[in-house]
Image: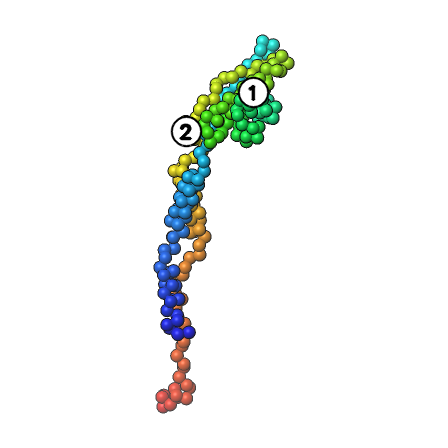
Amino acid sequence: MTDTARTPFHRAARRTRSVPRWWPLPAGILLGALAGGGYGLAVTPQYTATGYVIAVPTEKADPMSAVGFAQAYGKVATQVAVLSDAQVAAGVPVATLRSSVRAETSPDAPMVSISATSADPAKAMEMANAVARALTTEASHTKDDTHVELLRFTRAVKPTEPSTPSAALTALVGTCAGGLLGGLALLLRPRREQEQPAAATVPSPAPAAGAAVRGGA
């Protein structure tokens, strides 16, 4: 191969060697920021509204039993029996309520929180209040047997801010993740040889024995 044919390859090799070895770190940070910010802009903001119901024992019940019944009502809140009664007031089908509503309880307090998430803040409020109302109605049918009454404690209000992270936050998370991956790639990247191996030297041939004798003579 001629020197002219090797010249483009050698130039490309020199350009590759001139790139700093720490380039994966800024590249990872940039790509992570772009990916995180793009995700935050592409995802539709979601709003969450939360209401609370409380279990109140009657005169015939042990006050501590209200905590146990609150745990039970928290599991019943997202069942079909309750959601079917709530779908008319919420204005959405049962499948939407099942995927959008969640109930949480406390091990120390006889209270159930009912949260609903939607892209429409008003719809999130309506779903949370509809499920809470249906749950208290369902509990009233058995209060003579359980001696515990479920009451509305706090109504859900229309949320003013989305519960999903903003584009700035997702960009920050993406930047951190990209920097971490870039740092790992930098640590795992094999190091280039800093010095080229020394050229092998060929020892000079030893003088012939006869020449050495003549020289001595």
Q: Residues within 10 Å of mark 1 (few under 14, many from 20)?
A: many
Image quadrant containing the N terminus? bottom left
Quick check: 171 left or right of 139?
left
Q: Earlier in the sequence, mark 1 or mark 2?
A: 1
Q: In the drawing, what numbered circle is on residue 118? A: none
Q: Is residue 117 above or below residue 202?
A: above
Q: Is residue 111 above or below residue 25?
A: above
Q: How far from the left and from the top, in percent, is residue 55?
A: 55, 16
Q: Is residue 76 above or below residue 30?
A: above
Q: Is residue 100 visible?
A: yes
Image quadrant containing the C terminus? bottom left
Q: Residues within 10 Å of mark 2 (few under 14, many from 20)?
A: few
Q: Quadrant of residue 110?
A: top right
Task: Say which residue label 2 marks.
Answer: 161
- Label 2 residue SS: loop
Q: Residue at left 37%, top 90%? A: 214
Amino acid identity at mark 2: Glu
Amino acid identity at mark 1: Ala
Q: Are marks 1 and 2 in contact (CB under 8 Å)?
A: no
Q: Is residue 176 above or below residue 69?
A: below
- Label 1 residue SS: helix
Q: How far from the left and from the top, in percent, is residue 106?
A: 53, 23
Q: Residue at left 36%, top 57%? A: 19
Q: How far from the left and from the top, in percent, is residue 67?
A: 56, 19
Task: Say which residue label 1 marks.
Answer: 134
Q: Residue at left 56%, top 28%? A: 93
Q: How far from the left and from the top, in percent, is residue 144?
A: 62, 12
Q: Is residue 77 visible?
A: no
Question: Could you tell me how many numbered marks the image carries?
Answer: 2
Q: Quadrant of residue 162?
A: top left
- Observer-nearest residue: 27 or 88? 88
**Label 1 to label 2: alpha-carbon separation:** 26 Å
